[in-house]
Amino acid sequence: MTHMRVLLAAGVLGVVVAATAALAAAGPLDGAGSKVLNCAACHGAAGQSRSDAMPILAGAHPVYFKKAIQDYASGKRLSPEMEPYAKQVLVLGLDEIAAYFAAQRREPSRVKLDAAAVERGRTASTQCAPCHGPAGKGDADKGVPDIGGQPPGYLRNQLLLFKAERRSPGDEAVTKMKALLKAVPDDTLGDLAAYYSSLR
Amino acid sequence: MTITRRRFLQGSAAALAAAGCATAKTAGDLQPQSGRRVVVVGGGWGGATAAKYVRLADPSIEVILLEPNDRFVSCPFSNLVLSGVRPLSSLTFGYGDLRRNHGVTIVRAEATAIEPETKRVRVGEGYYTYDRLVVAPGVEFQWEQVEGLPQAKDTVLHAWKAGPQTTALAKQIQSMSDGGVFVISIPPVAYRCPPGPYERICQVAWYLKNTRPKSKVIVLDANENIVSKTALFRGVWQASYPNIDYRPRSRVVKVDPSTRTLTTEFGDAVTYDVVNLIPPQRAGTIAVQAGLVGDDKRWCQVDHVTYESVKHRNVHVVGDSTIGIPAPKSGNVANAMGKIAAVNIVNLLNGRPPSPLPPGNTCYSWINDREAIAVVNAYRIDNGKVVQIEQKLTPGPSAIYGQQAVGWATSIWSDILG
Ligand SMILES: Cc1cc2nc3c(=O)[nH]c(=O)nc-3n(C[C@H](O)[C@H](O)[C@H](O)COP(=O)(O)OP(=O)(O)OC[C@H]3O[C@@H](n4cnc5c(N)ncnc54)[C@H](O)[C@@H]3O)c2cc1C
């Protein structure tokens, strides 16, 4: 009897399944969407981080994204949070996950900014523009990240880490930028962070 | 079977009697099913996440979430309430967005029984039918394991489910006199949040050091050693908290509030001014009653990919109630399980194979008002089982990890409820 009921239920279900399969097939949690679920615990839904400390992944250039994951996994870029997750990304499929985040449109950070700091940062940013571009969009092919709209706390922290040679020590991709940052006072790094965060 | 059929008949009679009546039903089929339906028992870290993600993965599936509390109170960060660093209100959230943004039906009620045979969850005299059920009731305390505790439940606080007890314990600590003794008792593993008690010790020690320099914290730990982030906590205590007296292998078996004494299994008596007794734990009562626990009578074994119970088909268990997956009983893991279970429940309901998705875990612990340490675990699925890829610890405490802890909380709270 139980058995029959199960069969019956399965039959009814079958019809519903057929009707909804097409809809469900294109769901946001299929394929790569399901492989990035763990990232949301820190980076927000679809990589749209809303906090001050965690970077936005949405809209990241794939070349840069993949280098970041590889650098974390190899321990070149030190982060106790990211090293294990980077290794998980390598298991689940780096190209697919990089493509997923690249396809998300970045919603810029809404963390409050000090307008005066933004203005000071704008002035100081001329030295960054040769690589990061006038609007902070970077260079997708050359591995220069799009830093526009990232949360200010994250940007400031990364600049301090670069300056102290604590982010990716010895990485030749960033020797030039680090040389430049050595001469920039910490307060100005905060201004630069505010400026780049304000870009849309 | 007979019982089931009788109950079924009673149910239909009640349903008929109530038919046409617009007021909320309390008996029979409380909400007759029209399409496919997932019912979720428990709106905590695992259950609320699962409810939201079933709807995200397939909005054609109806989701009913049963939760007796009208607000979600986060255990993570609740140790900061004890040190006065954060108010409990900053950890308290409503369920409204689950309904508004995702169309989850939220029923403020406790599930009273599960009937896997007929695929029903009972709420008192009534029931909800389901195609798949998610059971996420968290932990229940084994009061009877400590003599005197069942009678002293209201004054000997656990504060291990964030809420009124958290604020009450904070008040007790804040009214201690300088020189007063705070005693905390840690249960044997497995319990909710392995590093949680040690974070709490840091918070209370930090508060007392600043405000009651003559006071001390005595730790009676049932375990051999600090259970999680051992070297990190030890380092912090040595460097910053001489007011901590840590005693391993000290399982508390008795409490006597009239003499303010705890007794360990070796007969040592320890007196307290304020006590925090964290009792031994098992899966939430509903999981035990429904026969979802294993031979240990405490925890639920599940499939590592779908979180379907090994005991009952179409019933999935997520969060602290589970055992066997090599991941800690943490909010982060409960959240990950909720998402993975949801995706795979939707796969199964749509006739697709489950996806082998692994969980991840991060537990930040605050060591004072500003700095934190963390443990991070990532997993993969190997032959249908969860296997750890790597565990990583922060090299030491830092304010940056504190900021990242806030980032984590902001993101994950909105992932659960937003
Ligand atoms: C002090 C402390 C600090 C912590 N810190 C961290 C941290 O920093 N990071 C971290 O990841 N984890 C932390 N945790 C652990 C985390 O809180 C738990 O692992 C998490 O809450 C488990 O989620 P869950 O869904 O299994 O249970 P819960 O979140 O407890 O949810 C269970 C829900 O089920 C409901 N329920 C129970 N029975 C029924 C029923 N019969 N019918 C309907 N509803 C029912 C309950 O009301 C409850 O809302 C901490 C825990 C504590 C105590």
Image: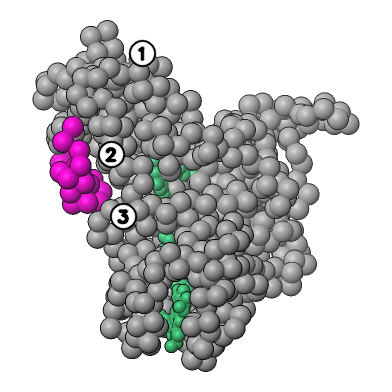
Vertical relation: B133 (above or below) B146 = below
As rendered, which of A179 and B102 lies closer to the eye?
A179
Q: Are marks 1 and 3 on the same chain?
A: yes
Choose the circle earlier in sequence order: 2 or 3.
2
Rendering coords of residue B171 (x, y %): 40, 22
Rendering coords of residue B252 (x, y %): 21, 26
Mark 2 vs mark 3: in front:
3
The residue that label 2 is drawn on is B202
Mark 2 vs mark 1: in front:
2
As rendered, which of B147 and B209 lies closer to the eye?
B209
Where does the magenta region start and end? B223-243
Q: Quadrant of residue A21?
A: bottom right
Vertical relation: B416 (above or below) A79 = above
**Circle 3 SS class:** loop
Find out if the beta carbon at label 2 lies less than 8 Å from the nearest ligand 1 atom. Answer: no
The single residue placed furthest to the right in the displayed view is: B20
User: Mark 3 belongs to which subunit?
Assistant: B
The residue that label 3 is drawn on is B398
The residue that label 1 is drawn on is B151
Q: Residues within 10 Å of mark 2 (few under 14, many from 20)?
A: many
Check disc 1 and give the amino acid type.
Answer: Gln
User: Mark 2 belongs to which subunit?
Assistant: B
User: Mark 1 belongs to which subunit?
Assistant: B
Q: Are marks 2 and 3 on the same chain?
A: yes
